[in-house]
Image (cartoon, rainbow, N blue to C red):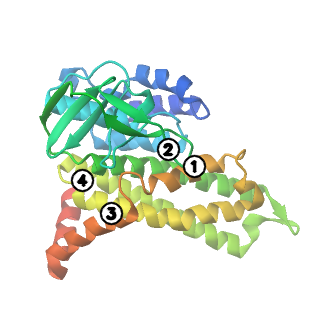
Amino acid sequence: MSENRQLLVEMAEGLFADLATASFEDAAPRLAEAGFATLLIPADQGGFGGDWGDVLAVLRLAGLNAVAAPVAEPIIAHALLAQAGIAAPEGLVTFVAANGRAPFGRHADAVVMVRDGTLSLYANGAFAVEEGASLAGEPSDLIKLAGEPTATAPCAANLDGLGAFARLAQASGAMEAAFTLAIDHVNTRVQFGRTLAKFQAVQQALAEFSEEAAAVDAAAAACAAALDAGDAEFEIAAGKYRLGLAVDRAVPIAHRVHGAIGFTIEYALNRYTRRLMHWRSEFGSDAHWARVLGRKAAGLGGHGLWREVAARTDRLIA
């Protein structure tokens, strides 16, 4: 880990731990003050000058602490605006997915949209918001354009792909948090005269959980490395689809080993599992990313797919 990333992680760890149970109203000003939105903006343009590995480190910690305010969205929106040469407005800037939804859209001062190779920035007043909610109860709002964009520029970015990476990164932290809660519970809860951790069936279930969490970690790291290398279409499709499989397998285990307490809204587990269940389908469902991955694999053919995977792996670890 570079010295800059280490300092970034230390700062994020302390801040996100403080915000772990904070409301949006309390968390948003402190996140804005911390300046995470400039994480991918070059230092000579007044930003942090970080890379996608730095973004992964920050988003993983946000997921680990269930931060109830947008962290990923301003980072991505500001980075695209900087690349396009468009000055970012003051306040919260989020982005609009292909389905028209924007996380925390009701709180946004501006939104970024990419359609048909064009990036458009819409200021508050040029869009209307139809409020909705995620499975975690957080704003997931439908954006309806009601005016002209403030600025436009050519852009080849796939916003759903970048959003999928963001959710994969956050999910890697949320999986760790859910796993830690499960481990702590089975090591303290006594049943039939011994802790749950002593039962072989529980041990086997948690071993499976750890495998799923490790797979999500590996997928997120591969995506970050591929984004830094300049082409992450394959890794994002595979990683987001793999997240869906992990949620399918790990979330039920987390709740089962907790017993009844794991299903109560008062208990901390739901802060992670409800987000995980929503994130698996946000910015493209399992079926969407399976189709993307399938078309890629079919186009390469059997031998071509193996050569492509090997070449991409060699490039990422070089």
- Residue 161, position as x, y percentages in the image: 28, 51
- Type of the residue with mark 2: Gly
Task: Please give the residue where the numbered disc 4 appears in the rendered image.
Answer: 226
For discs 4 and 3, the disc positioned in front in the rendered view: 3
Q: Are marks 4 and 3 in contact (CB under 8 Å)?
A: no
Task: Please give the residue where the numbered disc 2 appears in the rendered image.
Answer: 63
- Type of the residue with mark 4: Ala
Q: Is residue 302 left or right of residue 215?
A: left
Task: Please give the residue where the numbered disc 1 appears in the rendered image.
Answer: 272
User: Pointer 3: residues within 10 angstroms few (<14), some, or many (20+)?
Assistant: some
Q: Do the residues labelled 2 and 1 touch (CB within 8 Å)?
A: yes
Q: In this view, does 93 lie above or below 245?
A: above
Between 257 and 146, the residue placed more toward the observer is: 146
- Residue 309, position as x, y percentages in the image: 22, 69
Q: Residue at 31% across / 31% down in the picture?
A: 111
In this view, the residue farthest toward the left is 154
Task: Please give the residue where the numbered disc 3 appears in the rendered image.
Answer: 288
Q: Is residue 56 above or below residue 298?
A: above
- Where does the C terminus fall, quadrant-wise? bottom left
For discs 4 and 1, the disc positioned in front in the rendered view: 1
- Type of the residue with mark 3: His
Residue 109 visible within the image: yes
